[in-house]
Image: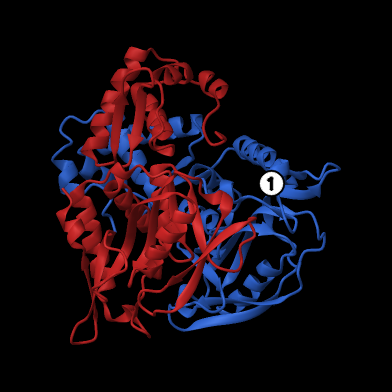
Chain colours: A blue, B red
Amino acid sequence: MDGARPGRKAVAANTSRLRRGERMIAIAHTLQSQPYRVHRLSAFAETLGAAKSTLSEDVASLRRVFERFGLGRIETLSGAAGGVRFVPQRDPSRIRRLAEELAAKLSSPGRLLPGGFLYTSDLLSTPAVVEQIGEAFATYFADRGPDVVLAMEVKGIPVAFMTARAFNVPLVTIRRAGRVTEGPAVTVNYVSGSSRLLQQMTLPLRAVREGQRVLFVDDFVRGGGTARGVFDLMREFRAEVVGVGAFVASREPKHKLVDDFFALLVFEGTDRRGQPVVRPSDQVLAIR
Amino acid sequence: MDGARPGRKAVAANTSRLRRGERMIAIAHTLQSQPYRVHRLSAFAETLGAAKSTLSEDVASLRRVFERFGLGRIETLSGAAGGVRFVPQRDPSRIRRLAEELAAKLSSPGRLLPGGFLYTSDLLSTPAVVEQIGEAFATYFADRGPDVVLAMEVKGIPVAFMTARAFNVPLVTIRRAGRVTEGPAVTVNYVSGSSRLLQQMTLPLRAVREGQRVLFVDDFVRGGGTARGVFDLMREFRAEVVGVGAFVASREPKHKLVDDFFALLVFEGTDRRGQPVVRPSDQVLAIR
């Protein structure tokens, strides 16, 4: 699927007078549109009509500017499978700044909804914000190497999707039972960690393959029942849950049904004026 | 919200020896991360430590390479509100090629699910594909200038999200009644255009404001009942539906409940061997 990338022929006809800056833009776009994928210099040599030594210098220059501006990491892999790849990587200080900015926005009176819910939908519907949250997850979970990112319908889908995009892996959405029209499906029961209600989650059989490494990303963790259900569901698929990420985790209940998850923000509860208190998680503050 | 972009101070300290290619990468990233937003050259002059005349040349060079590689359009706006902005814009030939590639993938026997459904979930869960579909919608609807993109849960959310990202506007998700925890909501009934069943759709009151221009994007149009429901719902919000986009429209039923929509692909039905037939829509073939 390369409909969005310049065809080789089209590019070759156009590269007669490409300057370094122009080559760098073309290389950056190719790398960024497919994170983690390895591209050989010889392929760039062909499409951009430049010598490999020239392209090596272009990539070195690109690597420096990506580092300087915190746009991610450009890695060179040597050997038979060698080449260049782009790894989305946020600087820890930027993740902290993002978490602080979002925490400040969420700590305001209008944010508390009936039932004690925190209103996050406006942030989770703003593409530029969601992109940054997804990249923060991709940075934190970089060494887990997921094959698939799992979302639970509905609100967590955009964040999970942008995490999947940063890893360049598919997003698979779990649905609450009932409406699946994608063939045979597996359904498990789970108990909500906060409401203690019995619920169901469903995933089409062909959505996840045996042995795959899955990262579950959601917008909110309260009791952890959903995440626990995801572990049960993945056991049926013989797939491995390699991480759980949440945009916001509530402080209460203290005892969650999963121990090991990463949250960007913590919803502490309300202060004396009834205003929500949200702050960056200890995990974010500890990222080095 | 600029947690992901280099802070001015951090950049200024690092720009002593920036070359044109490096400035071009930094400018490209700033423009692309916020499509349609106008950036003044004076802001770049400050963050990149270069003269405005130099930056003008950088932008001209950037514009050329974006054009050459079909990465979108860089526009210069003059006057008091002047500056530079990035408009995601796909070349018509690339949109056609994308539609052809996707149609070929969908025209295979394994794609037909019980009930006559077409299996599209794998494509709609692949970030690089969804990004291209979203940009195709953004290209087609560019002159409609939406303030908001609307999605209907669940499968259409990623495509709608990537369309919203290309327009740099919020994504708002309509839910089938029941589970909304975002405060007061408006619910309307609608009749499914294919099954003729009465259904409900719900949107939080604060999700769309009076007078906003909304673009509805979905994964599949069959009878058009959902789209018709969206028109009714938006009337309650006193908002205007400026466009309806669908990844796939089914040929049958011929009479849809909305006339004016754009589909990337058409699901014609099945051939004699029971294999689904999917092709680029006439609208895609007519894009100039």
Tag 1 residue: A111
Q: Is residue A83 above or below residue B31?
A: below
Side (left or right) of A155 relative to A164: right
Side (left or right) of B40 relative to B91: right
Q: Residue at x 80, y 47 (%)?
A: A270
Q: Residue at x 16, y 37 (%)?
A: A14
Side (left or right) of B68 relative to B25: left
Instruction: Identify the residue at the far left of this view.
Output: A13
Q: Position of residue A81 (x, y in %)?
A: 37, 55
Q: Residue at x 35, y 58 (%)?
A: B129
For badge 1, the amino acid type reads: Arg
* Quadrant position of residue B24: top left
Q: Position of residue A209 (x, y in %)?
A: 48, 75
Pick the front one: A227 or B118: B118
Q: Position of residue A21 (x, y in %)?
A: 31, 28
* Quadrant position of residue B147: top left
Pick the front one: A125 or A182: A125
